[in-house]
Image: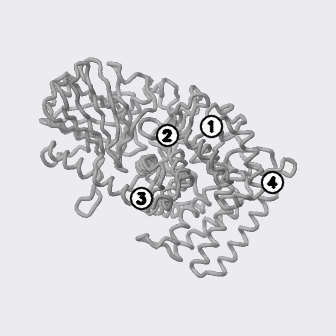
Amino acid sequence: MNDLDLAPIGNCAISALVDRQGRMVWCCAPRVDSDPFFSQLLSGTDPSDEKARGLWAIELAGPQTATQSYFRNTAVLRTELIDAAGAALEIIDFAPRFPLYDRSYKPTALVRLIRPLRGAPRVRIRMRPTCDWGSADAPWASGSNHLRYLGQDVTLRLTTNAPISHIASERFFRLEAPVALFLGTDEPFQGEVLSTVQRMLADTVSYWREWVRALALPLDWQEEVIRAAIALKLCAYDETGAIVAALTTSIPEAPGSGRNWDYRYCWLRDAYYVVQALNRLGAVDILENYLAFLRNIMDQAVGDHVQPVYGVGYEPILGERIAPDLAGYRGMGPVRVGNQAHEQIQHDVYGQIVLSTAHAFFDERLLRPPGRDEFAALERQGERAFAVYDKPDAGLWELRTRTAVHTYSAAMCWAACDRLGNIAEKLGLNDRAHLWNERAKIIRAAIETHAWSEADGHFTSVFDAPDLDASLTQLADLRFLSPDDPRHLATLRALESRLRRGSNFLRYDGADDFGVPETAFNFCTFWFIEALYLAGEVDEARGLFEAMLAKRNHAGLLSEDSGLSDGALWGNYPQTYSLVGLINCAVLLSRPWSSVR
């Protein structure tokens, strides 16, 4: 059966997940939130099964062993397959991306290059795309040197230098020379396929290495940070600037829990944390593209109300439904398409819009620095934040059956007003700075009154209630509290007592719409590590960070959740929250460069 030992490839237009045997088991096309062209990950079947559907496999005759790794500092994946006699081949998987004609060439295309290494490997190619969420095999037709597959949302053409009948009949054949497979939109392939693909490979490797070369890395854990940063970039959709929470849908948060959600959309909260982390590494391209996404979202907002989540093409309606023809990851359905969170009220979004944008007013590197017009547009988000900071919402955990005044949401509204004051001062707008600073004081007073429990001696996650959740660690990160504030330290101790489980940290420990959580939310564990570091408990923070690194899969990545007893990965993958946490903690905990210079 499937597991999350998967390696993503992509080019910020299309992405795919490849298992350790070199089988492509998940790919949505033409966009990350489209119908899955390869749906095997959610089929409930083993990809090695002869009847498996929704995959693109390259297999040796007889038993095979596999090793897999990325080309250094790239999103280009190499899988080596070896048969029982020692014959071997390599599969190089990538999505083309490089400069071409003064533009970024990033087509809706996946490339597989198969090269013989030793002996005489016999190989077959199983190309079995599906459509309409696994309900049918994608219809296909053949041409002189290509196969055409009619997907639900796109028609893709496979162009190759291998005999077409080998692929159509799935026969084994002797691999005596390199085989190139270019799966792209239904257009004639320009040029000789093998040599063209080989040039694309070289140019794509060069692109990724140049991108990584511009990152400002910490001294320690550089390989781990690079891999996380590349995966975060793969979750960006360059055409609009959207950043999705993950590349998958419906991987359960815990076995058989029903906590199966579609994360292939842009949550403003998640995206804020992504740009914050990548800004720490100097990756301003993601910030600039995302700010363009935000400007378009704000322009289309009705009455200045902003949703917590949108489609990657700014779509506001993400109607949630069940896909009945897919059994789900390991057979653990349901498979959900769309996300009901688009209907929810989550007041923290106004703070995240302002926080994501505030950096740009102080960064002279940007090609399009914001000015007074952008500040005026941003003030509308501040007005909304000030109007709703003490009103009930679904909160950041997106509870579906109850609302409350959440401290995290109120703190984000405070941050919106506070940062608008900073921006106004930068622009020389003293009257506006005074206005926003005064509003920030009003919200602060409300939080300190209604979210502080004098009886318990700590902050609570809901106004005038005893609730606790991991979001309270963010009061220091937001600069609402200083890390050495006795109230923050007392809250941290209370959180640790309630939510820590060994090296893991829960979101909350009470029952929600689906019962008591059974796994740890990885981002919350990273939040706790950051809080420990800021509180001066550096050795403890380092120990927990190393424990989190040990949970990564062979591709160096994490999903949303971890099993409490075995550390197994659960939840959608790769999860941007988790990778953000990895980067933030590495930057905080690393030795300074001055220690080795």
Q: Position of residue 24 (x, y in %)?
A: 34, 33
**Crowding near the residue tagged with mark 1, few <14, some 14–19, many ≥20 C-alpha atoms within 10 Å:** some
Q: Earlier in the sequence, mark 3 or mark 1?
A: 3
Q: Is residue 185 left or right of residue 437?
A: left
Circle 2: residue type: Leu
Q: Which residue is mark 1?
A: 503
Identify the image quadrant of residue 142: top left
In the rendered view, how is the structure colored? one colour
Q: Which residue is mark 2?
A: 558
Q: Which residue is mark 3?
A: 215
Name above or below for residue 402 compared with residue 277: above
Quarter of the image containing the N terminus? top left
Q: Position of residue 455 (x, y in %)?
A: 87, 48
Q: Which residue is mark 4?
A: 452
Secondary structure beneath disc 4?
strand
Q: Toward the viewer: 553 or 545?
A: 545
Give how far apart the Cα atoms at labels 3 and 1 are. Answer: 30 Å
Identify the image quadrant of residue 446: bottom right
